[in-house]
Every structure is written in C-alpha cells, then in structure tokens.
Image (cartoon, grey):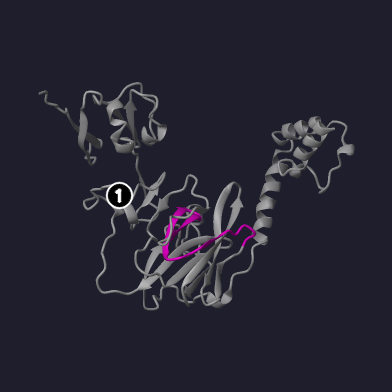
C-alpha cells in the first residue's frame, strides 16, 4: 500500500499533470501505479511529447495571466525627463521599438510602459515579485514601502513575492539578460548584502546600480509581464566621480569579481563595454585565492574562432584546481599548452597583450613571463 501511495503521489505531481484532464486521482483506480508512472514517462518522450510541451506553455501563460495589473498612477508619459535628479540607468536589454526587422526582437524586448516613484520618506522595505517561464526566472515587479506608511507597486505583482527590510538603501546588484532582469540583490548599507531575489544562475551581473550616495527615486520599465530596465535617482551634485571603473560599471560573466580586485582599466581599446548594449566582460580567477594555484600552472593555450580568439585555457599539474579557474571563453580540448610556464619553479606571468588583426595576419596574443630567482644565504 505504501508503494502504491508513493507512485500515485508521483503521478499526481506536476511532473505528470500534462497527461490528465482531471485534478484528483484515487489509488484504487489504478492496479499498478508504478507501471502507469513509467508508461507516462515513456510516452512523454514519444507520442505525448507535443502534449507535454503545450501543457508547459499553458502553465506559463496561466502564471502571466495571474499577475496583477500595474498601478496606472505612477506611469510616466516622458521617461526621459530627469525631474531634477541624476539617474543611474541599467537599460542593456532594451531594443528600439521602431526597428524594421522583427527578428531583432529575439535579442531584446520592447518597453510598454515606465513607472517612476520619488521616495516620500525613508525606504524601509522592498518586496520583489518573480515568475518562472520555462525554467527561467524573471523579475515582474517591485513594491516599495516607506516609513510614512505609504507604498508603491512598480510593475506586476506575482504570488512569489519575498521581501527584505531596509536600513540604508544602497542600490542593487543586478543579474540581467537580453530578455529582461532575472535577479536582484538588495544592497543595505546597514547590514550584509542580502540573498538573491529571483535568480542569478548563468546570468551576467553588474554593480552599475550600486550607490554610496543617497537614493531618492526609482524608475522601472516593463514589457508585457517582466522588468526590462531599472534606474535609481540621486540628488544632482556639481562634483562627482566621472567614471567609476569597470568593476562597478561593466556587465560581468560568469560572476562578479571581488570589489578589491585591482584592475588596470583606464586604458582600453575598442568600444566601451559600459556603453555598448549588452557587451559582456568575461573573466577567470586562474591564480586562485592568494595565488595558491600559480605553483601548479604549466602553461596557457589559445583557441581561435572566426578569425579571432574564442578562449584561453590555463593548464595545471594539479587536479584540485576547479574548472572555473581553468577556462575563459570557448576553449578546445588541447593536450598541451601553447605557452609553457614553470609555475612550480617560480616562473610567473608579467603581462599579456594582444595585437589587432592586420591582413593578411591574424590577431596575436603575446604572453611575457619571468623566472623568479631566490637567494641562498
């Protein structure tokens, strides 16, 4: 009986609901629940495959239809009006609505409306609404609650809406894709960084909306069901640091570098990643914590792709070095390195620079390294 109840519960789960038009299943209706479960799983990959796909699409549509309507009182007719504030904007996913090529919307989204709120008093709580669409999480809306008892809903409110209390609001760390904002990490200067609301799984991330100055306003843009752009307003000041650096302003993948990482980012070539739409900066921490992996470094390999560099792989003699510290970009599986480095003997990289392609020559990568000498008394 216990086995029958177990397999019946599996059948009644969301894993198998596409196969039934009824909501309740009784164990007595099936002689062998285990057989039925296995039969459904087999048919899901065969004759019921299309039914399962349409069922999942219908489930997503129901989640969207269950969202609450936006608050029309905060919708702005002229989102570009700064209303005497200095705005930090995150708008990479946005595509121009007047594009003539409908295929370009695959890598973007169109803004249907924009809401703006000027903080009436101290912001004490933020509630984040999320929705899952075919395995991908999106932020659908934000509810802002203030000390004076007022609250404002930006965007759509879903059933999944966790909240966080705020002491001193310092902005957001954002996980964003080409189709919208997937996750938010609320920065509270009065406590440690909060957990992720939504999801940051396999998403580019940025600190662009982190501010050490007072935040007094928020602007959010939405499409039919999700948040696609976000901006935070600060009082206008005459003297302000002109460029915060790539650590704070770029879009990073697969995760954010540490804020105390020293970067030589004042000199760069090509289009700025902070101004171009959805250009990512890939990075790899191949040296490990405190440079602990460098003693195992045996060389570097480069993968070419479409006339350029597709990836860089770091080779190590120790299997304990994680894969996340071994590869940058898309790399071929090479047996040996292109550049040999004797990490165990104290040899280390001094600098790396690249050369632009000049026909008929391909781009080049130059790695300079130096042998470390130690004295003996």
Q: Quadrant of residue 285?
A: top left
Q: Is residue 233 left or right of residue 261?
A: right
Question: Residue 5: x and y, percent?
Answer: 81, 36
Residue 170 is covered by the magenta coloring: yes
Q: Residue furthest top?
A: 335
Which corner quadrant of the image does residue 3 belong to? top right
Question: Residue 195 in the image: x percent, y percent?
Answer: 49, 52
Assign a secondary structure to mark 1: loop
Q: On screen, 12 above or below 232? A: above
What residue lies at 21% left-to-right and 31% top-to-bottom?
Answer: 348
Residue 361 visible: no
Front-lying residue, 48 or 135: 135
Quick one: which residue is furthest to the right in this view?
A: 28
* Label 1 packing within 10 angstroms: few (<14), some (14-19), many (20+): few
Q: Which residues are magenta?
A: 158-187
> Which is more toward the observer, 288 or 98?
288
Percent across and percent down for residue 38 are 75, 31
Total tally of numbered discs in the picture: 1
Q: Position of residue 334 (x, y in %)?
A: 36, 24
Q: Main secondary structure of the magenta part?
A: strand
Q: Quadrant of the N terminus?
A: top right
Judge whether residue 134 is colored magenta.
no
Does any portion of residue 17 appear in the rendered image? yes
301 vs 107, left or right, is: left
Q: Nearer the viewer, residue 240 or 91?
A: 240
Q: Mark 1 sits on what residue? A: 260
């Amino acid at each position: 009986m216990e086995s029958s109840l177990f397999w019946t519960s599996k059948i009644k789960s969301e894993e198998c609901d596409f196969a039934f038009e009824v909501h309740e299943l009784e164990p007595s209706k099936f002689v062998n629940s285990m057989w039925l479960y296995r039969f459904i799983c087999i048919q899901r990959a065969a004759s019921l495959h299309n039914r399962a796909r349409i069922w999942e699409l219908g489930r997503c549509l129901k989640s969207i239809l269950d969202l609450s309507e936006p608050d029309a009182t905060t919708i702005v007719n002229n989102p570009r009006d700064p209303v005497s504030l200095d705005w930090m904007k995150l708008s990479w996913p946005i595509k121009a609505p007047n594009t003539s090529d409908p295929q370009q919307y695959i890598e973007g989204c169109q803004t249907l409306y924009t809401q703006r709120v000027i903080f009436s008093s101290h912001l004490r709580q933020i509630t984040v609404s999320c929705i899952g669409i075919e395995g991908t999480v999106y932020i659908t809306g934000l509810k802002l609650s203030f000390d004076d008892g007022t609250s404002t809903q930006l965007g759509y409110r879903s059933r999944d809406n966790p909240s966080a209390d705020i002491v001193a609001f310092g902005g957001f760390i954002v996980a964003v894709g080409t189709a919208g904002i997937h996750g938010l990490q609320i920065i509270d200067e009065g406590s440690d960084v909060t957990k992720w609301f939504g999801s940051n799984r396999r998403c580019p991330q940025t600190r662009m909306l982190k501010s050490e100055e007072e935040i007094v306003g928020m602007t959010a843009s939405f499409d039919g069901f999700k948040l696609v752009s976000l901006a935070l307003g600060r009082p206008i000041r005459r003297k302000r640091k002109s460029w915060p650096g790539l650590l704070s302003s770029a879009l990073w993948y697969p995760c954010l570098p540490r804020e105390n990482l020293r970067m030589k980012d004042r000199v760069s070539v090509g289009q700025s990643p902070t101004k171009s739409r959805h250009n990512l900066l890939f990075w790899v921490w191949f040296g490990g914590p405190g440079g602990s992996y460098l003693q195992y470094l045996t060389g570097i390999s480069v993968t070419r792709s479409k006339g350029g560099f597709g990836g860089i792989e770091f080779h190590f003699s120790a299997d304990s070095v994680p894969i996340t510290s071994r590869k940058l970009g898309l790399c071929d599986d090479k047996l040996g390195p292109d550049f040999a480095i004797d990490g165990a003997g104290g040899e280390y990289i001094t600098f790396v620079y690249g050369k632009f392609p000049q026909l008929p020559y391909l781009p080049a990568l130059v790695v300079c390294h130096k042998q470390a000498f130690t004295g003996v008394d």
